[in-house]
Every structure is written in C-alpha cells, then in structure tokens.
Image: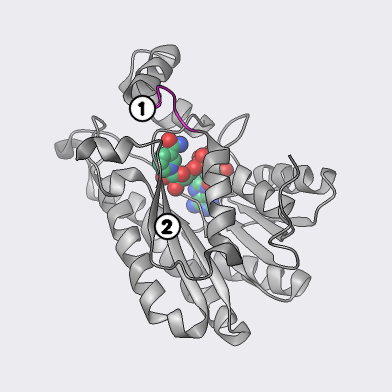
Amino acid sequence: MVPARRLQGRVALVFGAGSSGPGWGNGKAAAVQYAREGAAVVAVDQFTAAAQETADIIRLEGNAAIAQQADVTSAESIGRAVEATLAQYGRIDILHNNVGITDMGALEDITEARWKKVMDVNLSSVYRSCRRVIPVMRRQGRGAIVNISSIAAVLINPYPYYSYYASKAALNQFTKALAVQYARHGIRANTIMPGLMKTPMVEKQIVGQHGDAAEMQRARDAMSPMGRQGDAWDVARAAAFLASDDAAYITGVCLPVDGGLSCLAG
Ligand SMILES: NC(=O)c1ccc[n+]([C@@H]2O[C@H](COP(=O)([O-])OP(=O)(O)OC[C@H]3O[C@@H](n4cnc5c(N)ncnc54)[C@H](O)[C@@H]3O)[C@@H](O)[C@H]2O)c1
C-alpha cells in the first residue's frame, strides 16, 4: 500500500536514525516512514555509516535525504546537525528523538558514572536537541516533536534497568511541559511509548536477561497480549501520525504502542 503523502514539503530531523544491527530499528524505520509520507529527512547517527545507510535507503526509494554524523551527548554536535539541516532544507518541521540505551544490573553495581551516562543519552540529549530546535520552530510558527520513550516509563517489567525507567519517565514529563509551554507557538510535542518490540537493539541490549536469543523472542512474544511483539514499523507509523496534521490537536500525549501490554497493569 502506498502511504498518504501527508508530510509533503516537511523537513524531518531524526536523531538516532541508524540501527544497532541488521534489519529495522525504531529510528531507521521512522526516518524511512517520514520520507515515504513526503518529508525530506536528515538522518543523524553517532555512526556515519549507520546514518548513511538510512539516507541511502530513502534516496533509493526516490525520496529526499541527507546523512549527518552527530553525538547527542554534545550540544555542539547537535548544533552542527541542525545547521546542516537548515543549510540543506531551510526549515525543521519534525524533530524526532530516538536515541536511547539500557543499562542492566543490581542497583549496588550501578556506579554513578553508569547512571549519569544513561541520563545523558536518554534524557539530556532531548533537552539539548529541543533547546536548539525550538527557536527554529518558533520562528516558523510551527513544528512537531516526537520523543521515543518506552512503556517502561509507566510500567516496571522483569528487567533491572533503573536508570532506563527513570530517564524514560522523566522524558514523558519533560515532553508534557514542552507541549504546554509551546502550544501557543504552534509547536506540538508528544512521546511514543513502545512496548515489547522485535528490533535489532533488543538482540544486543536485552538478550543477556534471557537464556539465548530464541528463548528471549519466545518469552517476549508470550508476554505480549497479542501473542507477538511489535516491530519498528508500528513505532514509525505512529510517529508519522503524530508528526502530521492528522494529529493537529494532539499534544502532550504519551502514546503506548504496545499491543495492549500496558492494560495488563490494570
Ligand atoms: N526495541 C524495543 O523493544 C523498545 C522498547 C521501548 C522503547 N524503545 C526505544 O526505542 C529507541 C531505540 O530504538 P531503535 O530500535 O532505533 O534502537 P537502535 O539501537 O537500533 O538505534 C538507535 C541508533 O541511535 C544511535 N545512537 C546511540 N547513541 C547515540 C548518540 N550518543 N548519538 C547519536 N546517535 C546515537 C545508534 O548508533 C543507533 O544507530 C530507544 O529510545 C529505546 O528506548 C525500544
């Protein structure tokens, strides 16, 4: 099915647009989905090759994209990606913050450096990119921010990742504050809370909590009310909706994309 071109003429800046393994991660799929719906995309990743791969896919499909290397733990690096976007396309309509990492372990083993790293990558990164991009959106009088949170912001699951729970909960609240403060400037801000998604990142960061990859996939499918995990495209389609004018009156929402997982908590 050919997607509606509801983002025609828009420019999307996607941080974390690569994938941590072969296949489709949430950020890579979102970048491609934005392009399929008409947006010109700036695919940003800490790894040039990962950003380039996503931009190449978009261009091969006949849509517009450039790749940009940036590290979201650096305001200067984010600034360079923003400047490159403005130089190439002249505006930023969609800011998509996808970068997120987990850090598992008993609390006694989580050093302050490890704690701070997750907060920096998952939460302060979004403060940095929003701080840099919101003035651009204010000048334009419009903009949509999509932050990738997690259902772990509101639910505790069997995984011991304290900094991840805390950073994603804070990201939700930060996004709601943005939504209210900038509502009158034409800027909307929402989060997506993916549930159990079958993405390459899980094979790297979560598999250690299970016997092996096959056992992990079985367990995660079984935990999901639909009997299967979601995938990166479920997140990507929700992001394109939230970024589009179809969501013109939706701001400050933390949208579960979890196949009903969050309902189990009552
Ligand atoms: N897969 C799941 O089950 C699941 C569930 C809930 C939430 N999420 C969220 O989805 C997001 C990640 O999804 P994904 O599938 O795209 O992951 P991914 O790891 O495949 O891709 C993230 C990309 O971000 C890049 N990156 C990492 N650190 C960076 C940095 N400092 N600066 C710039 N780029 C950096 C990586 O190189 C990678 O290409 C995270 O926010 C995660 O918390 C995933």
Q: Residue furthest left?
A: 108
Q: Is residue 149 left or right of residue 163?
A: right
Q: Amino acid at mark 1?
A: Ser
Name which residue lies at 60% across and 35% down.
24
Name which residue lies at 58% across and 71% down.
79
- Would you say residue 229 sits in the magenta stretch? yes
Q: Which residue is mark 2?
A: 191
Question: Marks 2 and 1: which is nearer the front?
Answer: 1
Q: Report helix, strand or loop for mark 1.
A: loop
Label 2, label 1: how far apart the Cα atoms are: 21 Å
Question: Can residue 101 be seen here?
Answer: no
Mark 1 burial class by Cα count in 10 Å: few <14, some 14-19, many 20+: many
Residue 34 spot, x, y in % from top left: 66, 54
Magenta span main SS: loop
Q: Amino acid at mark 2?
A: Thr
Q: Which residue is mark 1?
A: 224
Mark 2 burial class by Cα count in 10 Å: few <14, some 14-19, many 20+: many
